Image (cartoon, rainbow, N blue to C red):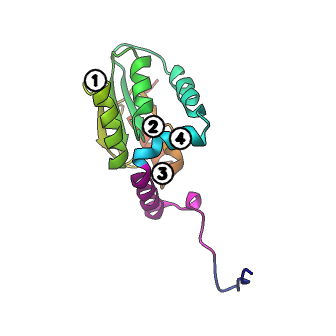
Amino acid sequence: MVPAMDNSHTPGKAAYTWIGPAREQAVQRMFTEIAGFYDLNNSLLSFGLHHSWKRQAIAKIPTHQNTQALDLGAGTCDLAILLDRHLQCSSKIIAADLNVAMLRVGQQKLRTQKLTDRIACLQMNAEHLTFPDNSFDTVTAGFCIRNVGHLPQALKEISRVLKPG
């Protein structure tokens, strides 16, 4: 039997409703725990559809020589790797993520595929990008947007670092 709740007890909010540092800390703990299994989990939970979603997103990005690209919330670098192929290996890509464990998995993929000369991994918070204004021709964010603590601030930062046009 489940005990009845009295009015003095307020149930906790679901993680997706948290904002700010509490959300950031919860997200960091989760991704640190699952980093080694993230790609498998993504495939299982999406029935493999995430591969198609990523390819469709990348296909919408114009291809130009020497494109400067930022993959924000890069995690294990899948989107950055697809972006490199799409841009025909002629660009420089920054794969940025707040979670070090996820970036380590991504860095291993980059080493295995010999992409470390074109894709650099940086630990960075989407809400506080350290790049100058107008630094990138394109910014991808994959599944990152759902996990930021302050979405308006992250979107403002993305807009700030994108070149006009």
Quarter of the view holding residue 97: top left
Disc 1 designates what residue?
Answer: 114
Q: Which amino acid, mark 4?
A: Asn
Instruction: Give the magenta-colored segment's residue range.
Output: 11-34
Q: Are marks 1 and 4 in contact (CB under 8 Å)?
A: no
Mark seen at residue 42: 4
Quarter in which the N terminus is drawn: bottom right
Quarter of the view holding residue 75: top left
| N-term mark: 3 or 2 | 3
Q: Which amino acid, mark 3?
A: Val
Disc 3 designates what residue?
Answer: 148
Main SS type for the magenta part?
helix
Query: Is 7 located above or below residue 91 in the figure?
Result: below
Q: Are marks 3 and 2 in contact (CB under 8 Å)?
A: no
- The residue under the point 36% across, 20% down is 67
- The residue under the point 44% across, 39% down is 158
Residue 102 in sight here: yes
Q: Position of residue 73 (x, y in %)?
A: 42, 42
